[in-house]
Amino acid sequence: MRNQLRAAQMDHVDHGKMRVQVTSALGMIPVEDATITISYTGEPQSALEQVSTDGNGQSEELSLAAPPLEYSMEPEQSQPYAEYTVEVEAEGYRPVSVEGVDVFSGELSLQNVRMEPLEVPEQGQKNIVIPANTLFGNFPPKIAEAEIKPMDESGEIVLSRVVIPEYVVVHDGTPGDSTAGDYYVKYKDYIKNVASSEIYATWPQSTIQANILAIMSFTLNRVYTEW
């Protein structure tokens, strides 16, 4: 995997873009004059770009090397995206590192970074590692489920109309792992994050929309049936 990552980062013929949005963990206030350092994932000492955020907490759009577009258009052994590490520092805040930010050819990657002020107790994870896209990485097989579900269990929810929840509860582990934490995640953020990890931004718009509708349908089925 290390050799594949190295090849994906160095064998570039195309370019994509990245913009970073930096906000305070308290009140989502933009963090101005934060220093953003971009490097290849796996080579944190090889700084490629260093920029500062503006009054809206945003960086400029950075042009970064990416593998050829055709790598993401059909099954390939070559990694179709480059991976970058984003390190953010700002006066009065704890530093944050995000490793594994994907950049595709011709696409704009938007990376949000939330920073904790020094005066509040330390809570969040400061070194975030984004896993490989599920279309490219090696992951355990999906847990098998029965095609026909029982209908007589308690906890079933039946509503007269479809309601989109504001939050969903995400269990950070296998269903039987009682030691894994449960997290409340905004529904729209959950759908966005699942989509970005399961499909490629370079696909045709109709293909992306179809996949997102499937993700939404699956998620809402989980929410209302608790299966």
Image (cartoon, rainbow, N blue to C red):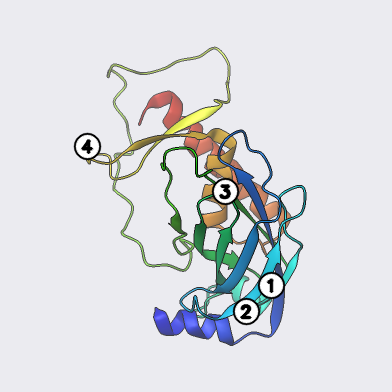
Q: Earlier in the sequence, mark 4 or mark 1?
A: 1
- Where in the figure is residue 186, as x and y percent of width and height? 54, 34
- Circles 3 and 2: CB distance less than 8 Å? no
Q: Earlier in the sequence, mark 1 or mark 2?
A: 2
- Name the disc covering residue 92, or none: 3
Q: Secondary structure at mark 4?
A: loop
The Cα atoms of the two marked residues, 3 and 2, are separated by 37 Å
Q: Is residue 120 above or below residue 94?
A: above
The Cα atoms of the two marked residues, 3 and 1, are separated by 36 Å
Q: Say whether residue 21 is left or right of residue 1.
A: right
For the residue pair 146 and 162, the one nearer the viewer reads as 162
Kindly indicate the quadrant of the structure image that contains residue 9.
bottom right
Kindly indicate the quadrant of the structure image that contains residue 70.
bottom right
The Cα atoms of the two marked residues, 4 and 2, are separated by 41 Å
Q: Say whether residue 168 is left or right of residue 11.
A: left
The Cα atoms of the two marked residues, 1 and 2, are separated by 6 Å
For the residue pair 163 and 64, the one nearer the viewer reads as 64
- Where in the figure is residue 140, as x and y percent of width and height? 31, 59
For the residue pair 187 and 72, the one nearer the viewer reads as 187
Q: Amino acid at mark 4?
A: Ser
Q: Amino acid at mark 3?
A: Gly
Q: Earlier in the sequence, mark 3 or mark 1?
A: 3
Q: Residues within 10 Å of mark 1 (few under 14, many from 20)?
A: many
Q: Residues within 10 Å of mark 3 (few under 14, many from 20)?
A: few
- Circles 4 and 1: CB distance less than 8 Å? no
Which quarter of the image is occupied by the C terminus? top left
Q: Secondary structure at mark 3?
A: loop
The Cα atoms of the two marked residues, 4 and 3, are separated by 37 Å
- Name the disc covering residue 67, or none: 2
Q: Is residue 192 visible?
A: yes
- Name the disc covering residue 105, or none: 1
